[in-house]
Image: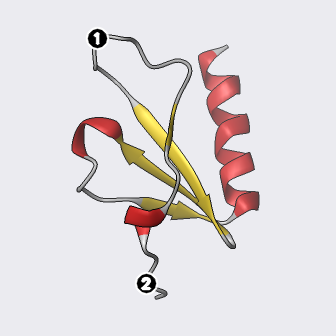
Amino acid sequence: MTKVNVTSARWRKSSYSGGTGGECVEIASVPGLVLLRDSKDSGGPVLGLTPAAARELMSRLREWSG
């Protein structure tokens, strides 16, 4: 497993996140990985996906949300 410095990553909040602070997802990219985290817990766990896996996840989420 490779260690990634997530504190220096440039995080962006989803445009679908509401202004009330609920259900917020943030995304960042570092060389070779796309990072996802819960914006309410910026020090919590981070999911690291390859760019291909991130594209697949986003595609499936779009299908699911219809």
Q: Secondary structure at mark 1?
A: loop
**What residue did someone put label 1 on?**
20
- Tell me the amino acid under the disc marked 2: Lys
**Rendered image quadrant of residue 30:** bottom right
Residue 58 spot, x, y in % from top left: 67, 38
Question: Counting other residues with Cα less than 10 Å from the Cα at mark 2, is it few (<14), some (14-19), or many (20 or more)?
Answer: few
Q: Quadrant of the C terminus?
A: top right
- Tell me the amino acid under the disc marked 1: Thr
Residues at circles 2 and 1 in contact by the CB criterion of under 8 Å: no
Mark 2 and mark 1 lie on one chain; the one further toward the N terminus is: 2
Quote the CA–CA distance across marks 2 and 1: 32 Å
Q: Is residue 12 left or right of residue 47?
A: right
Residue 53 spot, x, y in % from top left: 68, 58
Q: Is residue 22 left or right of residue 7?
A: left
**What residue did someone put label 2 on?**
3
Residue 49 spot, x, y in % from top left: 59, 62
Up-down relation of residue 5 to residue 26 (above or below): below
Q: Residue at x 38, y 59 (%)?
A: 46
Q: Residue at x 73, y 36 (%)?
A: 59
Q: Can you tell which mark lies on residue 29?
A: none
Up-down relation of residue 42 to residue 22 (above or below): below
